[in-house]
Image (cartoon, coloured by chain):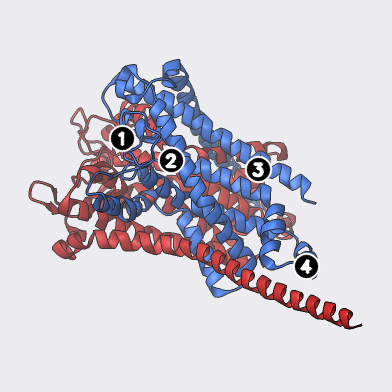
Chain colours: A red, B blue
Amino acid sequence: MQANVGAVAAASQAQEARAQRDARQDRLFSWLLKGCALLVLACLLGAAGATLWGGRHAFGTFGWHFLFSAEWDPGTDTYGALVPVYGTIATSLIALIIAVPVSFGIAIYLSEVAPAWLRTPVASAIELLAGIPSIIYGMWGLFIFAPFFADHIKPWLTSYLGDKPDDGKLSWVAAHVPFVGKLFGSDYPFGASILTAGIVLAVMIVPFISSVMREVFQTVPSRLKESAYALGSSTWEVSWDIVLPYTRSAVIGGIFLGLGRALGETMAVTFVLGNAMKLSPSLLDPGASIASTIANQFSEAAGLQKSTLMALAFLLFVVTFIVLLIARWMLRQMAHKEGR
Amino acid sequence: MAADSLLYTRRRVVNAIALAMSTLATVIGLVFLAWILWETLRQGISALHLQLFTKITAYGEDGGLLNAMVGSFIIDLIGIVIATPIGVLAGTWLAEYASGTKLGESIRFLNDILLSAPSIVLGLFVYTIVVLPSTTLTNGSTTFSGWAGGVALALIALPVIVRTSDEMLRLVPSTLREAALSLGIPQWKLTLQILIRAARSGIITGVLLALARISGETAPLLFTAFGNNYLTFNPMDKMSSLPQVIYQYANDPGEGLHAIAWAGAFVLTMFVLLLSLASRLVLSRNKVSHD
């Protein structure tokens, strides 16, 4: 009897000890996990903080003038952000102008037009584009697309739209429509230009935007589409008046996601942008973007120039952060609507 | 009546044009894919040579890419080895411990942003926290290093792994958790030995995708691993990597170097595409075995 009570007491003591140990280990484990998750936060804050800290000399030296100055002269140590900022925005906008309609077309084709057996293979092929490393886009852009552009597309653009045609005869468009002549006028003989970079970027972001669009188009309840078809709508009317309004916030989110990609893309742009630190109104002249400027100059820069490049990186980070924030927020709106 | 039939014709024409345009858009997308792959294949295969895998870049046009491939392997390995445990644990926290909490939701949201953050800025971040301090500590004898490159790539791999782990763990049926907890298993054992194991193939997919992503990254390596024309296995040294050598060679005026760059691009593309294929296979097998 006595021994039995002792055994029970010992057992319950052992159980107690084990429960305590388990609880302690659980606490430690959850702290470890939380620490890992907080590292994600630390990365973002760290990246912003490190570039801001690195760029403090540039911000301090140039102040607000930094954003609006097009000067870039390592000789006198004077730097302005306008050229790379303009290049980043211009290339990204060109990319969006091309990529958004194309992605929309692809998404509509894959969700409404294509026969069922063709959808998966075509969709996987388009997504394959997203998997190709950006350096490959860069090489293709530099060795294949830029020469092609210089030989076949650029002469056409300069002679029919530009204000500096080879034969000196101004086309009707260049003479009568404001700005167009300036945008397409160029006497730079090579293929590297803001427009080329914009086109290469467009090819890069099409798979991102189109896969987001396709995914959300498939979430549209079929009863909505079927009701529209039953009332006699055509496929296009269903796409434009039913599918697109229903998925609007996610579509905008997908577009912003593509924009975020385009703004921060380095390699593909560096190869085909020409890296000229000079402001030119023409889209056919070479330019520079924030990322390409950093990639080209950072390893040889010192002092104020290095700080300027850090400051540019900070600007890029903040702008892409805001763009991506909007993108994710818009996509989340859609997810909430779906009840996910 | 005439107006009606006019409207009808107009709608039909608009529909036909719109659908033709959408088909055209798809064709354009596929043409660019084929164009890029075809050129990489054509230029790459014609430049493919055995000495690509046996000689180092120090020989220039007569050399190969051995040191770049070894460097890429080591740097990618460091990146994956750092990012995998942290990423899986962080994803586990998001899925198992923090779902519904404010902090959890914010971190999930910010992780999605980190996923598409510009890699060059992450490279500068690592330059600031790894390269600069190591330069100061060793009085300049160590500056750029394979370690720094690995850390930079880890930052890029991390959000990919976090996201897939999080998503895959949330797919694990909750009956599994309840069954284990009702037997009195502590939560850490449940997480490590049951949940992560159940979501294993999904998590492996994430790691493979992350590897595919970082093995093509160039920008952050430019000011972390920097590059090295000689073969080294020591991550404390400067190290070259495949994308970085491709970048350097493609920007060089020498035609012979362009050929080597194409060959490198071909090897890199094949590697990345095979990885994403493999990750798809792992995932599709998972789907079958999961029910």
| Structural distance between the alpha carbons of marks 2 and 1 | 44 Å
Tags 3 and 4 touching, CB below 8 Å? no
Same-subunit check for callouts 1 and 4: no
Q: Residues within 10 Å of mark 2 (few under 14, many from 20)?
A: many
Q: Which residue is mark 1?
A: A157
| Mark closer to the observer (1, 4) | 4
- What is the secondary structure assignment of the residue under circle 1? helix
A22 to the left or right of A321: right
| Res. B178 mark | 4
| Structural distance between the alpha carbons of marks 2 and 3 | 45 Å
Residue A324 visible at all: yes
- What is the secondary structure assignment of the residue under circle 3? helix
Q: Residue furthest right?
A: A1
| Res. A113 mark | 3
| Res. B75 mark | 2
Q: Chain of mark 4?
A: B
A164 to the left or right of B68: left
